[in-house]
Amino acid sequence: MHKKVINLTSRDIVPSPAHFFKLFPIGLKLLLSFCFFLLVITAKANSSHQLIQVAGFNIEIKGERGDFSWHWETKKIEDNLEILTLTLHSSQPAVPPPFSLKWSLPSHNIAGFWSVTAGYRKIVSPSWWPSRVKAMLARSAPMFALFGHDNSNRLNVAVSEALKTTLLSCGLKEEDGRIYCQIDFFTEKERWLKNYTVEIRFDRRPLPFFKALQEIPRWWASHPGYQPAWTPDLAKWPMYSTWYSYHQNVSAETLLEEANLARQLGFRAIIVDDGWQTLDSSRGYAFTGDWRPERIPQMKEFVQALHRLDMKILLWYAVPFMGEKAENFERFKGKYLRYWQGQGAYVLDPRYPEVRAYIINIFKQALQEWDLDGFKLDFIARFTADEKTILEASDGRDYASVNEATDRLMTDLIDELRKIKPDIMIEFRQPYVGPLMRKYGNIFRVGDCPNVAVSNRVGIVDLRLLGDSTAIHSDMIMWHYDEPVEVAALQFLNIIFGVPQVSVRLKEIPQEHLEMLKFLTDYWIRHRSILLEGEFEPLFPLANYPLITARKNGHQITAVYTNEVISLGNEPQLNKLDIFNAKLTNRVLLDIQEDQGDWEYLIRDCRGNILERKTINLSRGTHGFTVPPSGIISFGRINGIPKNN
């Protein structure tokens, strides 16, 4: 028997719509065609798909209009610097639709991708897994930059929206060698609104990337509600931190001894970290939330003793947490955002006015009763909504948005604290270092990187480039006490362009370590105006800034972290030059591009011991010097030698 094999398709099994359409009467065909036409027109009317010329780019705006009308305009600030303003409006409150800005550029001289939280990963990733920034109130900053192999600015983009979540990404497409960029708005659940305006700043100017970046925080600060907090001078002095040296095992007696030694070195404040508020030493937060000084019960007397030493004090608080074993836990049941599994703590919901009032009162009471000088406010980024969060101002909540409620909490908190003490110091750490966080805090600190000098260096530079007048602090430095002193010194030399925080037990470290710390701290204090406020030049971000320079009033301080050659051009105003050999090789090379005349130089080790003093003519060409690891070579023009440098 012959069998015929028949391959059946969906068309064979189920008649297609076109087949049915042929069976309809002509009148019905016309009616259906007209309805289909209206459906297409309506769909297109609700879709926003436009091309806009901004800074030489064809920017595609893509998304659904929803119930909103759209308006856009561009403003040219100067050549290659333009601002795009987008406005959405709805006659009635509605959920804003997700939308994106998309554009591309050829990958000409693009070495890497920069964001304030990129850390070591400053590469441009492929388009199928692009480099990303997720920014919101308490996470990162809404911007990115593309930089060249020659330290040039190829493009930086900044968004004025710093409260709501914004996604920014860039990726290289392998097929055409172009970099595809995208900014996404309203990607998360959002409350209803009627009006929304956002600005996007496009900067393609041929400047050094670090100069272009330093203009962005000033642009943010020009927007209403973004005015940064004033930074007192005390925030720019070295501080002692208890975290790595003592963790939760703090006591008033021990810390007063450490504070006394720190003050003799020139430190002006101590940060008492986690542990003062609980006798629990498990490193979790189950007992957090009541904020009673269980481990330092005589807190007022302790603070008074510190003040007699001429030391200020900042006290650590985990702002969002209420531990499941805290006395106040039951009081706020039903008013938590979520539970932190493994830490034994809940995250308070700032949308409840009684939650905000409780938190604010905790800090006011501490400031008034104990006469504190500042706070280290931790874990702010935990104040976030998720897919389970009900974004409604109901059931006792007076805000629908968690971000807006957090902004209200922090704004009211800082206002109340400044009424009591106008020069209050407030520290935040990476990643909550965006433009709105500068409104509340005047100290930004590098994220935790114990004993990792290069992470501290990279973090300080990244924060400084967007920090402007905010004090930029290192993560507290530590080292193993058996380290050779030259290796221990690297921890300090990697943070000299930020404010040092130190967390070693000063009464226990070896004598040569103490001498090193004294010498470098003294140098830093005498030159802090140059290191913190001078013209700042960090080079080669893709290589983790191996060469960093600060200049002010004819004095240049350079630190070299790898075997880089230091170039010196025509610098007629330069009369002092200090170079830190912040590495474990002993050669420092100067490339003199034009004759500099006669100079005297002084070589010292990391403890300040003088090893060599000579006169040299810095003629055009390459000059090599033997400088010990972690040592310093200081140059001064003849008749302009910096004495006691």
Image (spheres, grey):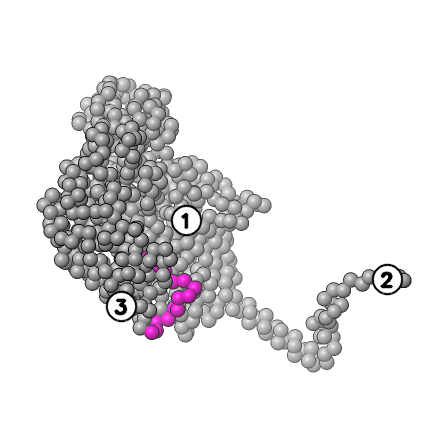
Circle 2 or circle 1, nearest the eye: 2
> Which numbered disc flags the more N-terminal residue, 2 or 1?
2
Circle 1 or circle 3, nearest the eye: 3
Mark 1 to mark 3 CA distance (whole Å): 43 Å
Mark 2 to mark 1 CA distance (whole Å): 67 Å
Q: Is 135 a magenta residue?
A: no
Query: Which residue is identified by label 3?
Result: 331
Query: Which residue is identified by label 1?
Result: 144
x, y (%) of residue 466? 33, 47
Asked whether disc 2 touches disc 3, contact meaning CB atoms under 8 Å apart, the reply is no
Q: Nearer the viewer, residue 390 or 198?
A: 390
Q: Nearer the viewer, residue 231 or 355?
A: 355
Circle 2 packing at 10 Å, graded few (<14), some (14-19), many (20+), is: few
- What residue is rendered at 39% in x and 69% in y? 390
Q: Secondary structure at mark 3?
A: helix
Quadrant showing the N terminus = bottom right
x, y (%) of residue 433? 32, 51
Q: Which mark identifies residue 3?
A: 2
Q: Secondary structure at mark 1?
A: strand
Q: Is residue 28 left or right of residue 478?
A: right
- What residue is rendered at 21% in x and 43% in y? 239
- What residue is rendered at 17% in x and 57% in y? 366
Asked whether disc 1 touches disc 3, contact meaning CB atoms under 8 Å apart, the reply is no
* Camera sees residue 320: no
x, y (%) of residue 572? 27, 29
x, y (%) of residue 187? 45, 61
- Span highlighted in magenta in the image: 380-395
